[in-house]
Amino acid sequence: MPSVSRFAYVRTPVVRTFVAPLAVLIVCSASAWAQGGASVGGVVKDQSGAALPGTTVTVLNTGTGAAQTLVAGPSGNYLAVNLQPGQYQVTAELSGFGAGKKTVTLNVGVESTVDFSLGVAALSESVTVTGESPLVEVTTATPLSVVNGEQLASLPVLDRNFLVVAQILPSAAPMSNLAVSTRFAVTKFGGVADQRNGYTTIIDGTTVDDATWGSPVINMTQDAVQEFKVFRNQFDAQFGSALNAVVNVVSKSGTNQFGGTGYYFGRDKNLNAKNALATSVPPFQQYRLGGTFSGPIAMNKTHLFAAVEYLNIDKANIVALPATNPFAAQQNGNYPFTVTEKIFDTKLDHRFNGKNSLMVRYAYDNQLTPSGGPVNASGTITDYSRSHSVVAEDNWIVSQNKVNTFRYALLYHNLYTLPANFDLAIGRPSYSVGQNGVAPQYFPRTNNSFFDTFYINTAKHDIKIGGELTLASSNFEAHFTEHGSFSFTTDLPFNVSDSRTWPQSFTMQTPGFYNYKSKQIAGFIQDDWRLHDRVRLNLGLRYDIDTNLRNNDFYTLLLANPLYKGLDYFVSSDRGNDTNNVQPRVGLTWDPRGNGKLVVRGGFGHYVTRNRPWFDETAMDKALGSAVRITDPVALSRFPDINGVLNGKSLADYVAQGGVRSLYLIDNSYQLPFALNTTGGFGLQLNNVTSLDVDVVHGYAGDQLGTTDKNLPASGPVTAANPRPRPQFSQVGVMVNNGRSWYDAVEIQLRTRVRGTDSLQISYTYSKSILDGVTFYSTYSGTDRTPDNYSYNATDTPHNLSIAASTSLPLKFQLSGVFRAISGGPRPVSAGVDLDGDLNTSNDRPAGLPQTVGRGDVPSQLAIINAFRTSRGLGAVDMSLLNIDPVIDLDLRLTKVISLPHNRRFEIFLEGYNLTNHTTLYGGASAMTSSSFLIRTSALDARQTQWGGRFVF
């Protein structure tokens, strides 16, 4: 591969990346409300119930002055789509009849129904009715939740991240205490194997998912988010790339009034309680500064919104290894580090005329996130994430019942990770030191995406037809284990005379630079069919294809290379592609009372997630780099002399002269994981401000990802007498679709919505999440030839209760809070040694022991663990180590509002987090051979206090 300096693409491509696409953007005018906007529609009738076709219906945004005029169809029907969420005035006028006028608040992704019954002009007068977005969704069978701007502004949210706010919704929960990879992830939804395949995040109509870790790469300032909606377990065909949830965010727009905010939030160690595992309160100081500005450029025509925020946190990572850990004395302590984030968002809305409008939004997010820790620890790294997102959308009213929305989106993201040291890596059951195994690494990537959606409204059908095209280019500079890594199965010091203390394996790889390109294509049709006045049928069909999913050209070249003779045992040149991604979706709603206050709903859908280029790039890196995994005991006895392990050769010479090479490959039949979700339930309006939603969910996810070694003999340990099928290679890891998961739940949501800041939202989920597979694509199945991974998912949290409330108090005080009580997740365990002779210790377990413990038949799990430890000369562990700590958390905010002249105000905040100072312990060594097996090494934050102020004008 050609040599390319990382600075050629880390620093310079921003100009190249933006100039050409922005030129296209300006010329083509693109879009965003198609996926994120609101709709309002209904039927106009006279007082006898007869339809009034030809009625003029005007939909006016009271904030921006933007108006859309429609003419009711043959059945008196009308529908305005792709509207910016906010307050609207809807007017119906027909000669000979009195005018009808209603105001309604539209929420993101919601179709509100506003019907009119017009009286004869001489006998009636115009009547204005004020309303809100419907409390019960009668148009869609999708279970969903909306978090509006008032909740975002009033609830205490320490991180000011909309995905943290989403944790007040059914099936959503924090991830920090769960035993899964949480890189850049803060919230889990449902129970799929890998949460990054589970949900997608959409901001202003376009996804902002990380190509490497799958989590969103843009965090808008909280004051820039108008509202967001989460579709749970069911969603229309216009949405893809996710198995069980869509987070749909709409940013704020300017209005006809100038306004804005300026705010500050601060924290200090003197107001924090001591972490349960710390010996003293660690250093801590935070300040967050930001502001917004909005207003008209041209009244009723062009509006601007802008927001900026800077965050600086000086904190410390607490390393609290138990006394039984032989590394505790040298590693324990508080390790300071600094987190920073810079965010900028701006949005321009322009109406060319009554039939054509343009929106352009730019978002920038620059994060510096060190992990903190001892400088010699392999887990101590620093992540850098810099993102630019541009979205532009053109909304064209073609005719009275047809609308076309075209959108262009550019996402440039540069993610890179640097290690704290470049020393020889040494991994032991209880601790690891040396260079991180995958750092440094650099991932600049650019996505250019094009979307078009055509809307057709008839008396019976609301139809959406659309297509999507993303041109993705991802670069990868890799330095995996470039300075060597020894893996041990014991904490005992190395003794050349005692083979029990020798390493189990040695891995090393040369660095390289790689580029991966793909085209992601999708098409969909959605028909919301009014079968009856009280019955809606939601029919959808979606198709997705990734043209370079299996990276076929790369493997064709590799197979032709004589250095890889024998590779055809694992992959073939005729790999084809995953073309089986037809996704039907159906839902039904029934309004038995006919007044929109009770809806019975149910639905079924087939969903396919997205590919992450990281999979293909790491496979390219492992294959083209000179990668070895040496398990020969004689060579390993030369630890720590890498030169001795490689027989006096450089790594490149060792491989070129016949040294066995290790590989990581994408399977011939790799396909995108899928889910089959079924839901059923009801929504009930209890009074004018309160609704209750209850849904039963069953989700099955298949083709989940994991890794297996394909270069193993049919049975027995790998030895000279029982060699690998292709002995010129050592371990050949292949990413395969070998996992399944099941999620069953009852999700309940009670919402009370009062005007202003007063609100109450109670969510409760009772669920069960089962996994037959692994939770991360690169994790091996353990005993690869006889895998047994059926267990509770590490993200299984059976009970999940959240209460979010806000209320006004006398003297212009406001009190708001969030209470959570959530079951903890079970703990993963492994033997820590190779049990089946495949020369891999990853995920091996004694027969009968599930991969997670602490849930299910816990006494049996403990018996198997202690029997194994006894056989290894280790002491028994106590039942208490298998206990699972719940998360119990109370956060409160007290706000004092000071009114100022000219409609201005100043708000003073005092916030407390985890006010009960509840201790939630988690973490701990998962290897049963570790001296600190399952002894907790981490605790969620103790009580914290934050203060702040906000000026609103």
Image (tube, rainbow, N blue to C red):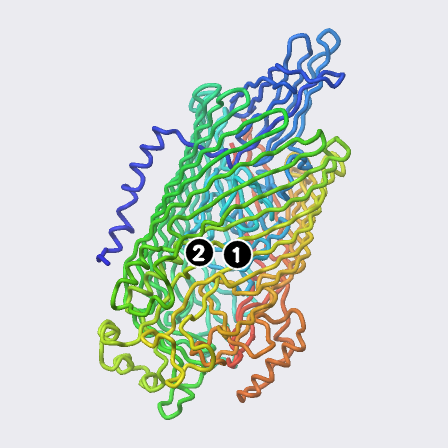
Task: Examine the rendered structure and indicate whether residue 811 appears above or below residue 564.
Answer: above
Task: Examine the rendered structure and indicate whether residue 248 appears above or below residue 41.
Answer: below
Q: Where is residue 138 in the image (x, y as percent from the top left)?
A: 68, 35
Task: Please state which amino acid type lies under the numbered disc 1.
Answer: Gln
Q: Is mark 2 on a helix, strand or loop?
A: loop
Q: Which residue is drawn at 56% across and 55% down?
A: 188
Q: Where is residue 628 in the image (x, y as percent from the top left)?
A: 32, 73
Give the crowd class for mark 2: few <14, some 14-19, many >=20 residues within 10 Å. some
Residue 327 image label: none
Q: Can residue 496 be seen in this view?
A: yes
Q: Can residue 423 be seen in this view?
A: no
Q: Is mark 1 on a helix, strand or loop?
A: helix
Q: Which residue is drawn at 64% across and 32% down?
A: 133
Q: Earlier in the sequence, mark 1 or mark 2?
A: 1
Give the crowd class for mark 1: few <14, some 14-19, many >=20 residues within 10 Å. many
Q: Spatial distance from mark 1 to mark 2, Cα to Cα?
A: 10 Å
Q: Which residue is tagged 2?
A: 213
Q: Where is residue 539 in the image (x, y as percent from the top left)?
A: 60, 38
Q: Which residue is tagged 1?
A: 195
Q: Residue 277 occupies which quadrant of the picture?
A: bottom right
Q: Residue 110 occupies which quadrant of the picture?
A: top right
Q: Which of 311 and 6 is in front in this view?
A: 6
Task: Please state which amino acid type lies under the numbered disc 2.
Answer: Trp
Q: Is 675 displayed left or right of 114 in the figure?
A: left
Q: Which residue is drawn at 68% across and 24% down?
A: 115
Task: Examine the rendered structure and indicate whether residue 83 appears above or below residue 322.
Answer: above
